[in-house]
Image (tube, coloured by chain):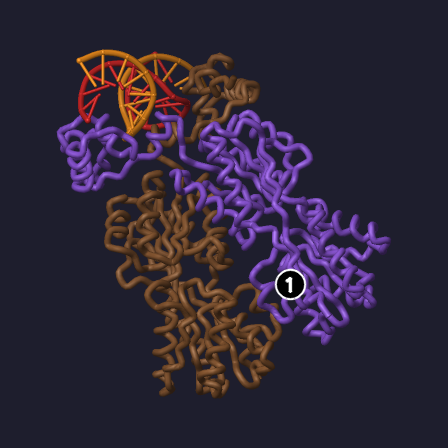
Chain colours: A brown, B purple, C red, D orange
Amino acid sequence: MTRRAPTMIDIARLAGVSPMTVSRAFKDDGRVSDTARAAVMQAAEQLGYVFDSTASALRSQRSDFVAVTIPSINNANFADTVRGLSDGLRARGLQILLGYTDYDVQTEETLIAQLLRRRPEAMVVTGGTHTDRARALLDKAAIPVVEIWDLPARPIGHVVGFSNAAAMGMLVDHLVGQGRRRIAFIGGDAARDTRGTDRRRGFVAAMRRHGLDATRLIDAGAPPISMAEGAAAMAALLARLPDTDAVVCVSDLSAFGALSECQRRGVAVPDRVAIAGFGDYEIAAICVPPLTTVNPFPGQIGAQAAALILQALDGTLPDPALIGITPQLMTRASTGS
Amino acid sequence: MTRRAPTMIDIARLAGVSPMTVSRAFKDDGRVSDTARAAVMQAAEQLGYVFDSTASALRSQRSDFVAVTIPSINNANFADTVRGLSDGLRARGLQILLGYTDYDVQTEETLIAQLLRRRPEAMVVTGGTHTDRARALLDKAAIPVVEIWDLPARPIGHVVGFSNAAAMGMLVDHLVGQGRRRIAFIGGDAARDTRGTDRRRGFVAAMRRHGLDATRLIDAGAPPISMAEGAAAMAALLARLPDTDAVVCVSDLSAFGALSECQRRGVAVPDRVAIAGFGDYEIAAICVPPLTTVNPFPGQIGAQAAALILQALDGTLPDPALIGITPQLMTRASTGS
DNA sequence: TTGAAAGCGCTAACAA
DNA sequence: TTGTTAGCGCTTTCAA
C-alpha cells in the first residue's frame, strides 16, 4: 500500500509553521527566518517531501519550461545547440522540453501544438520555415520565440542564425580558389530539409557567380543524409560524371561517406577529387585526410538563444533581436594541395 | 496588451455547454454527443484555445511525463535509445522529459531530484550505478523505474540491458581467434563512466581467461572518450608498447580515432594492428577499413523499456522485469585478415 | 449524455 | 517575518 505523498501542508504541520512559510522556504529568494527554514527543511527531509512543480506551475503561471524543437535528436550539431541552451537556461531554473521534428514541418506543427499545452515560457524552433498554423500557434502563445540555425525571411520573433546559402558560398569560393572548376553538390530531397535546400541554393548561386556549371547535383534522398547515403551518392557521381574535381556535401557526415567511398575505390583525395562538408563535426578534424568544412558554432547558437530568452523573460528586450552567427571556413587537407 | 488565454470556461460559454462537457470532448474516450463535441471544437478553434496540461496534470495526478536520464545528449547510441523510448511512449500520449548526467552519478542524483518534481509517471535511468540518495529518491517516488544499458547487481526496478563486460569478452575472444595475443585496451577514467569501467573489467577478465597479459591498458581521460582522445591514446600506445597487435576501444568513436592515427602514421590495419570498438555507430560500417564492433541494439533497448513502462502503468506487470539484450558481434575488416 | 460541486497542491495578494 | 484567504484550470465524483 502506497501512502499519499506528503504535501506542503504535511511539512507545515510537522515544522510548526504555515504552508506559506514552507512555500517561501523552498524559494531561494523567499524571506524566511533561518530557524523557520531549518525546521521546514528538516521536516521535508524526514517525510521525504518532493516539491510539486505541477501545482506550482498552475498557481504561479510559471512552468519553468522552455520548449525546443530540433530536426533530430541524433545529430551532434543540434545536440551541441541543445547543450548550449540547456546550460544557459539552467542557471535560472529553466528546464528544456525537447521534441524532434524529423525534418518535417507538418511534424513540427503537431509537436509545437503539443509542447504549447505544457505552457512553456519560451519556445526555440530550429529553422525558419513553418506551416501557417504553426506560426499562428506561436503567435497566439504570446511567449518569446527564437528561430535558430537560419535567417528567416519573415521571422516570428527573435533569431539566432546564419545564412546556410552563404556558408555554401564560402566553400565554393574556397574550392574555386584552389583551382577546382567541375564542382558537384551532394544533398538531400529538396522538399523536406529546408536548411539542406538553402545549402543547395547557395551552392548553385555561388557556382553561377563564378560562371561555372551548377548542374552537378546529386540527390542523396530524404534528410538526414547519412554517411552511407553520402557514399552511395559519391559512387553515383563517379560513375555519371567522372571528371568531377570537387564535391561539396550537405554535411560532414555525407562528406565522410563520400571520402570513404573514394578511399575504397582508390580515388585520391584531394588530388583527383576535393571533398568539403558542413558542420565541423568531430569526424571532420579526425579523418584522413581531414575534411574542409564550415563551422556554424552550434553551441554558441544555443548559448545566444538562451541569453535572448533570459532577457526577453526579464523584459529587457523590447524589440525582436536578430543575432547573426558568422560561420567559419575550416580549411583542411581534403581540399588542399 | 495580451489578453488572458481562453480556458475551458470560455469555450463552454461560447459552445453553450458546461466546462465538464468541454473537458470530455478533449479526451478521446469521453462520451460526448457528436453535436456537443463539434460545438466545443468549433468554439475552441474560434478562440484559439490551447489545452492546459499543467492544470490537467494537477487535478488528475497524471502528468503524462516519463523522465529519462542519459549520460550525454551528444551520443548516437543514447539518441537511438531515446528515439525508441519516445516512439514507444508517444502512442499512449506519454512525453519524454530528458536530462543528461555528464557520466556522473552526483549529477545524476541532482537531475533525478529535479525530474521527480515534475511528477513523471515513470523513470528511465541509464546505467545501474547510482548514489544511495538517488536510489532512495526513486524508491520513495513509487513509480515504475527502468534501468537500461546495464545489468545492475541490485536493480531498483525493471531492467533492460546487457553485460558490458561480456560484450568486451566477445571482442577479445574474436581477436584471440584471429591469432592476436598482445591486445591493448583504450578506455576512460575508471572512476566515472561505470559502463566504461565494466568494459575494461570485461576486457581484463577475458584476457586472463585466455592466459594473456592484461596490462596494456591506456587511460584516455574522462568520459566520453572522443575520437581525438582515441587518436592520442593510440599514439601513446604505439610509442610505449609498439609490439601491440590488437586494440579494443571503449567505443567506436575512440576506435575510429585510433584507426585514423594508424592511417596517419602508416601503421597497417589490420595487418600490423587490429582495431575493435563498441556500439556499432554508423561510422564503424562506413570507415575504411570498417570496424569490428559490438552492436548493443540501442533502439531496441528504448523500445523494450517503453513497452515495460506501458505494462507497468497498466498494472499488467506485477514483478520486476529483467530483459536481457544480447549484443551482437559485428566482424569487419579492421580485425580480419 | 450532461452538469454541479469540490478540490488537486501550490502561491499571489493582502494583512498583521 | 509570518499567516490567511482565495484561486490557478482542469477533472473527479456524484447526481440527474
Residue B184 falls left or right of residue A151? right
Residue appearing at x 52%, y 74% in the figure = A258
Is the residue marked by circle 1 packed among few (<14), some (14-19), or many (20+) residues within 10 Å?
many
Q: Kindly identify the amino acid type of the residue bearing the numbered disc 1.
A: Ala
Q: Quadrant of residue A332?
A: bottom right
Q: Quadrant of residue C5?
A: top left
Estimate the x, y position of residue B168 in percent, counting from the top left.
71, 52
Residue A88 visible in the displayed image: yes
Q: Chain of mark 1?
A: B
Residue B229 visible in the displayed image: no
Residue appearing at x 33%, y 50% in the figure = A145
Residue appearing at x 46%, y 30% in the figure = B313
B89 or A135: nearer the viewer: B89
The correct choice, above or below, for B284 with respect to A330 in the image is above
Which residue has dot 1 on it?
A: B228
The correct choice, above or below, for A333 with respect to A58 in the image is below
Number of numbered discs on residues: 1
Residue B77 falls left or right of residue D12? right
Estimate the x, y position of residue B103 in percent, counting from the top left.
61, 46
Estimate the x, y position of residue A283 in percent, counting from the top left.
57, 66
B170 or A164: nearer the viewer: B170
- Quarter of the C terminus of chain A within the rendering: bottom right
